[in-house]
Amino acid sequence: MRTSAAVVTFFVLCFAAAGAHAAPFAEGFRKCQECHEPEVEVWKQTKHFKSYNEIHKKESAAKILAAAGGGASMRQNSTCVMCHYTETKASETAKPQVASGPSCESCHGASSEFRDVHNFYGDGVADAGKEAPANKAKRIAAATKAGMVWSFMTYDIAANCMDCHGLAQPKLKGDVLAKMLEAGHPGEPEFELVRYSQGSVRHRYYPPNVNVNAEMNPADLARLYIVGQAAKLVSSTTAAGKSTNAQYAALQKKREQDSRTALQSVADMPEVKAVLDKPSADSARKLADALKGKDLSAKVKAQLPAKTTYK
Ligand code: HEC
Ligand code: HEC
Ligand code: HEC
Ligand code: HEC
């Protein structure tokens, strides 16, 4: 039997289209471990990892669970799962399973579509040093399109933190979040990116010293602080519209006001003003880009958290 070229082309196109549109799913930290051992070791010392065996035993857990529709356990309640766990699948059609606490893919994006793309230096090219510049640009763009959140996408990483820290998860209804808040769930208006990311969570094994978990310099810290406040402003103003509940509205108002106050010291920067005037992912990403290479440490020095308070 002869298969016509047109039929073959048709199927190839279908597959290409299906590949491009497959919804990314999380695969779990073990998939990352073979190449990212140091990062996994750091993560295992964090609350994100340890929480898996502890959080449901907290005294307040039962009441909060009941407020969000109840169920047999936190791991079986889809609302809790969204922030407290990583739900992984072995393949696109497999059943999802709760596999760990928040993990690599909670911050860097579900990996099924980007994993084989993000480290592809080109056919037969084994290391980054020999990669063609054109391949690098293509690789970064393709992995990003497939859902990867790179380390240099600081606003997008910060936005991921804010989805969980601040009861602002965009995929959840405001009424549920408000009921959880009333049942005693923390709302964490105090979450500040430098303090929360540069303690136990910090993993910065960058070239040339890939064996050193490098601390940030003052300029890095200042940029991160500003992007974190911008992300908090976007998150709180978006979440505020989700519910009319008074306690929930007050939480989001506090988050909004705190971030607006924090940004005053750098409000002369046009990109900061744009975020203050119209908080959105778009204006915050532009700010993060504009900050690259800038040292604003003198302006925010007094606001930066002391190292001893890092989480
Ligand atoms: C087969 C090896 C391999 C596996 C498996 C792997 N990675 Fe990577 N990853 C790499 C390499 C190599 C790089 C460096 C890419 C470069 O040069 O830009 C990298 C880079 C990264 C970076 C970006 C670093 C930066 O500077 O932004 C992140 C984030 C990342 N990987 C996350 C993951 C996650 C999450 C997983 C698991 C789901 C994973 N990787 C699995 C090899 C791997
Ligand atoms: C929007 C994200 C989000 C959702 C949804 C969520 N949590 Fe949480 N939860 C968090 C974060 C973040 C913390 C850590 C807060 C902190 O460290 O102060 C936390 C902390 C907790 C704590 C510890 C409280 C304490 O005082 O130490 C309990 C208990 C808890 N959550 C229960 C639940 C239950 C039960 C559900 C499901 C009904 C749930 N959470 C859903 C994000 C969430
Ligand atoms: C709580 C969010 C969060 C989690 C969880 C997380 N990362 Fe990251 N990751 C970040 C942030 C933020 C950066 C940027 C660090 C910087 O440049 O200061 C980063 C940077 C990286 C980098 C580049 C720096 C380096 O160490 O080479 C890699 C690779 C990486 N992450 C891999 C992983 C892997 C693998 C896991 C799971 C074990 C993981 N990350 C878990 C937030 C997270
Ligand atoms: C998928 C949801 C999720 C994301 C995304 C997330 N976290 Fe968390 N984080 C949690 C939960 C849930 C806890 C609470 C664990 C517990 O109390 O057992 C937590 C706890 C923490 C803690 C410990 C707090 C303490 O009081 O000891 C730190 C620090 C932290 N997160 C930082 C970050 C940072 C920084 C980011 C972004 C780079 C981030 N998290 C992203 C869900 C998340």
Image (tube, rainbow, N blue to C red):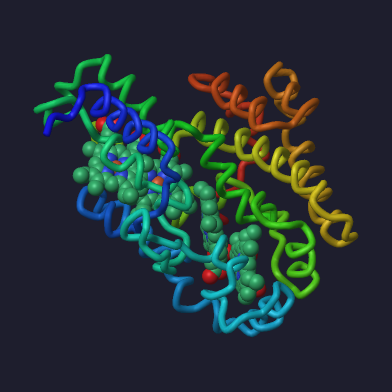
- The image shows residue 57, relative to residue 299, as above or below, that is below
Tell me which residue sits at (66%, 49%) in the image.
Answer: 170
Q: Which of 302 and 272 is in front in this view?
A: 272
Q: Quadrant of residue 229?
A: top right
Task: Using the rendered image of the protein, determine whether residue 202 is visible from the camera's viewpoint.
Answer: no
- The image shows residue 233, relative to residue 77, as above or below, that is above
| Residue 127 at x, y percent in the picture | 15, 30
| Residue 124 at x, y percent in the picture | 9, 28
- The image shows residue 311, relative to residue 52, as above or below, that is above
Q: In which quarter of the image is the N terminus?
A: top left
Tell me which residue sits at (54%, 75%) in the image.
Answer: 76
Q: Quadrant of residue 237?
A: top right
Task: Describe residue 186's horizontal placement relative to residue 254 as left or right.
Answer: left
Quarter of the render that holds ligand 2: bottom right
Tell me which residue sits at (67%, 79%) in the image.
Answer: 70
Task: Describe residue 151's horizontal placement relative to residue 308 as left or right.
Answer: left
The residue lying furthest to the front in this view is 1
Tell me which residue sits at (62%, 80%) in the image.
Answer: 71
Task: Describe residue 46's horizontal placement relative to residue 235 as left or right.
Answer: left
| Residue 30 at x, y percent in the picture | 28, 59
The residue lying furthest to the left in this view is 124
